[in-house]
Amino acid sequence: MLRDRVVVVGVSGGIAAYKACELVRRLRDRGATVVVVMSRAACEFVTPLTFQALSGNPVVSHLWGDQAPRFQLPRAAAARVRGHVEHVDIAEAADAVVLAPTTADLMARLVHGEAPDALTALVLATPAPVLVAPAMDLQMWRNPATQANVRTLAARGFRFVGPDSGPLASGLAGPGRLADLGAIVDATDEMLRVRTSMTGVRVLIGAGRTEEPLDPVRVLTNRSSGRMGFALAEAARDRGAEVTVVAGPTSVEPPHGVTIVPVTTALQMQRAMTEAAARADVVIMAAAVADYRPAKASSAKLKREGAELTLTFTPNPDILAGLGAARRAGQQIVGFALETHDGVANARRKLTAKNADLIVLNSPEHGIGTETNLVTLVEAGSTVELPEAGKREVAERILDRVLERRGTVAPELALAPRRASATSKRVSPRVVGTKRRAVTTKPAARVVAWNFSMSSRHLLHSFCMISSMPKPSLAISSADSGETELA
Ligand code: CTP
């Protein structure tokens, strides 16, 4: 997976920076093109020259400066580059970004979207997946601020590897050592595999809650925030899927890069889901649908009259059951079950009644309105309880299982099942590995030289702004033909 991929190694200022030198070599051994981006503090530990020699590419260590780098990039990566600003160009060329070592300070900056240097600016600008390999003293790692930052980044889709436990530079011992370099390389490979694991798959997700009007002011609804459905949408999007979300009202912002179909009531959601399901490969119903709606919504505001108010409700359609009944051949259907008691038995009943492949069982205290979730995956013949985790991580595991069921790539990012019942099937890395081998790699891309002068481009941009001419972009020269073109 690493061959002909551009891996940006981001080095921040910790003693483990010296280990990044060997990491660069190992990534290149696996066929990756490596570009190193360093923070100012990292340059105190290792010189850019060392990384330049090891990576075979210029090192980016400043946001501003008189640079004329010649990056050696595979043709596919060079084609993505628009050639306006150096750190954005590298961000766009990257297939993966590996931050090794990641200091506590770098994590804090990433959480807040600060970009005072080339490394942080690149991470903000890249659409590529980012792997974080923390390395710091154990007290810094255990500090609640650092742990909160880890959770925030994980919820945004950053992947983590390590830290390992052992002797630290401070003389203390405990968690804080940079992960084993082999583990970092493997995690990078895995991250790239996940990135394309749903390419071309059409995923439909029902998210949020429904609102059933009682009168022009009041609604019957529930406390669902929409986080789980949106986390699923983001995870599927980041794996290359074409994602449609039918979203009822939510308490959080919808993700970008997916098609959002806004609805309010259960009937509207049923219409939108049924229509979109006709072309979906995977349907995931994570919405909290009101089972009943007022038999008649009042057109005028209900007035306080007498001591008691009696309303009559009429059942809403079971959307998931309808989708299950009308499913296309090969379509995967995933539902949720929110249970306060007899969870597995009820989930199993819903699995059959709604003709679903998988029911994600959760409870109100863990699943509704929270940042994390504690779920059990219930299928015919298996029950697997996952550890409590952020909703994005839970979403990744659900998609892993969907892919396993589809018989395609089943990436595994180490959320081992916490407890399994007698009929449980562990999501074993060995099985996963067998399926991984079915993945085809892209044909080798030719290498071109990517060549530009920052300072001269700045001058040209200034000139173009003054004269209102279109901006020229990056000059890409082909190493094998010697041709030069303005792309
Ligand atoms: N669901 C649905 N349409 C409904 C109710 C639920 O599509 N009218 C879906 C939910 O999105 C979820 C699954 O069915 O994927 C189970 O929802 P849940 O609320 O747990 O159970 P219900 O089917 O509503 O049954 P009950 O409330 O009796 O537990």
Image (spheres, rainbow, N blue to C red):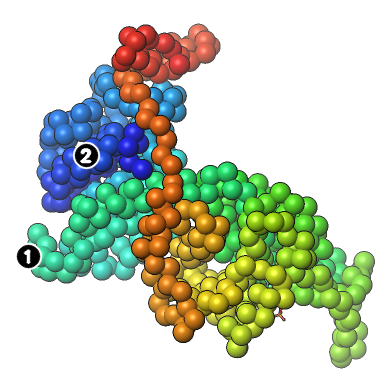
Q: Is mark 2 within 8 Å of ligand 1?
A: no
Quadrant position of residue 484:
top left
Residue 206 position within the rendered picture, expressed as x and y whole percent measured from the top left: 67, 60
The disc placed on residue 29 is 2
Residue 96 position within the rendered picture, expressed as x and y whole percent measured from the top left: 36, 42
Is disc 1 surrounded by few (<14), some (14 to 19) or many (20+) residues within 10 Å?
few
Q: Is mark 1 within 8 Å of ligand 1?
A: no
In this view, 44 is above or below 262:
above
Residue 258 position within the rendered picture, expressed as x and y whole percent measured from the top left: 61, 47
Q: Quadrant of the N terminus?
A: top left
In this view, 457 is above or below 260:
above
User: In this view of the protein, which residue sits in the foreground, 394 or 330?
Assistant: 330
Left or right: where does residue 391 sit relative to residue 308?
left
> Mark 1 and mark 2 in contact (Cβ < 8 Å)?
no
**Which is more N-terminal, label 1 or label 2?**
2
The disc placed on residue 189 is none
Q: Secondary structure at mark 2?
A: helix
Left or right: where does residue 430 sit relative to residue 246?
left
Quadrant position of residue 380:
bottom right
